[in-house]
Image: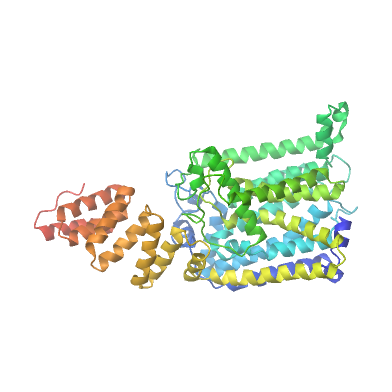
Amino acid sequence: MAELDTDLDHIIPSSVLPPFWAKLVVGFVSLVCFARSYDGDFVFDDSEAIVNNKDLRAETPLGDLWHHDFWGSRLSSNTSHKSYRPLTVLTFRINYYLSGGFHPVSFHVVNILLHGGISVLMVDVFSVLFGGLQYTSKGRRLNLAPRSSLLAALLFAVHPVHTECVAGVVGRADLLGALFFLLSFLGYCKAFRESNKEGTHSTFWVLLSILLGAVAMLCKEQGITVLGLNAVFDILVIGKLNVLEIVQKVLHKDKSLENISVLRNGGLLFRITLLASGGAGVLFVRWRIMGTGPPAFTEVDNPASFADSALVRAINYNYYYSLNAWLLLCPWWLCFDWSMGCIPLIKSVGDWRVIALAALWICLIGLIRQALCSEDSHRRRILTLGLGFLIIPFLPASNLFFRVGFVVAERVLYLPSAGYCMLLTLGFGALSKHTRKKKLIGAFVLGILFINMLRCVTRSCEWRSEERLFRSALSVCPLNAKVHYNVGKNLADKGNQTAAIRYYREAVRLNPKYVHAMNNLGNILKERNELREAEELLSLAVQIQPDFAAAWMNLGIVQNSLKRFEAAEQSYRTAIKHRRKYPDCYYNLGRLPSLTGRIASKLF
């Protein structure tokens, strides 16, 4: 879009517009933003997905990766998270092998390089989305929007909401999914390289694009949504469909509707059929691998999805969308976890937070109206593609098709942020066009880039250790019981029991059914010989969750210390009932006869 590029002339100088230099600048800036996380520890979910995941170890057969979820559990298990990402786990395994163990530096370096590579690819992706798809006679794609694509790629490279994906090792799933998502899109674009004749394409590249989409899904679930974006791109850019024109003809029952070329384009219909059937086939295979059953989530994971009222669910889902939009617009309010009371439910339309979702839909409706009704065909196309890139990759996290296991998750915004960067770039171009103070707009944009870079650096430092990460969340989500629990656990691991007790108590106060906090608090109180309160907490924990084996065993230890041997024996046996392989519990149960003077009864 030459007009938009001209409007951005005061923001992006012409001296850095050649493709090589543009990609070099974007790659360098993206590495600078997150380089500080290279020597960070394994933090938060990294422990379960990497350190405690047996699928990374050489003794585990490679074939098991195709039957296990992201966390190393069998997909057929009722407790499985059903997150099927075998290719991501395979890269973890390669990391483990090449580094000779669980050395986090190599894991972090791969993530940083992946983000750099994705940011560089974004230059090509944005050049197509902004400038359209045109090739020279030699088959070389033309970059018709060099300034626009560079600015959007820079905005993407330095967005602080990406920190979780880059600085947290488990974020590699999102990075790999995004990488193959973009390769699938660019591959689809190459289907039209060999000939500029309308309706012609290379079926090989279309099929390869579908294959790359399947690979993206095997890295992260939302990767499959690239097929939807490819379809939208094909209809709008290749087919040059004018949605407003068709709507008007339908409303007026215009008989010329059947003469619209795109509706009679056999090549387009064939490609859309390939995309639809390929996507349906891949999803069916994945559904069968999952065991044809959705994952089981609890109310604390996603409380809105458990609300009885459909209106309450709808209001809260839309409020979550507005929070995601705010994180893209103002990524200063970041937290590693948004569950367990961090975002209280909206239970009535009188809640002031309804204003946020109203503002979101006013903005979306305004953008959609411009995408449909703008007199500028280029603007219509860019707005529609930007909205498509923003919305389509977000759909799997929207709760519209199935329940997800989180309230808000910054990691799922990695791909949608590309659509946001497109819309922001278009907005900067419009501002520059309608004001005489073009240098002021340029300074404003450069200021945003610089501030975002600083935020990326500081947020990367917070992700370097669990202590910094957990404490950074206290000011963002003070009502989140899990935040207090994690701070307390970190303090307990360092031997600071007094401070840990305070945070565990706060976690239990915020969530009276938080059994893990009760168990850990009971353990500390047991070690401090405060046995009565420890027994009360552990008894409450097993009442709330009767199959909590660790709490049953700890309760048995407390009852043993109180010389209530029969009750202790019953608690140990209950723990073993719920966890057959429990050596510590067998040991404690085996010691009971020497304390009571009885002969040990049969364990089974």
Looking at the picture, tell me which residue is in the foreground, 66 or 74.
Answer: 74
Q: Where is residue 551 shown, x and y percent of the image?
A: 30, 55
Query: Residue shown at 63%/55% (left/top)?
Result: 413
Looking at the picture, tell me which residue is in the foreground, 565 or 354.
Answer: 354
- Determine whether, in the image, residue 116 is placed left or right of residue 463: right
- Indicate whether 363 appears above or below 534: above
Q: Quadrant of the N terminus?
A: bottom right
Q: Where is residue 57 shown, x and y percent of the image?
A: 46, 60
Q: Residue furthest left?
A: 597
Looking at the picture, tell me which residue is in the foreground, 438 or 40.
Answer: 438
Looking at the picture, tell me which residue is in the foreground, 30 or 524.
Answer: 524
Q: Where is residue 90 shown, x and y percent of the image?
A: 54, 56
Query: Residue shown at 78%/71% (left/top)?
Result: 443
Q: What colour scheme has been applied to the protein in the rendered image?
A: rainbow
Q: Is residue 535 visible?
A: yes
Q: Residue furthest right?
A: 137
Q: Quadrant of residue 2?
A: bottom right
Query: Residue shown at 78%/63% (left/top)?
Result: 150
Q: Residue furthest front?
A: 350
- Determine whether, in the image, residue 444 is placed left or right of residue 5: left
Query: Residue shown at 62%/61% (left/top)?
Result: 161
Q: Where is residue 162 shown, x and y percent of the image?
A: 62, 62
Q: Is residue 582 visible?
A: no
Q: Quadrant of residue 4?
A: bottom right
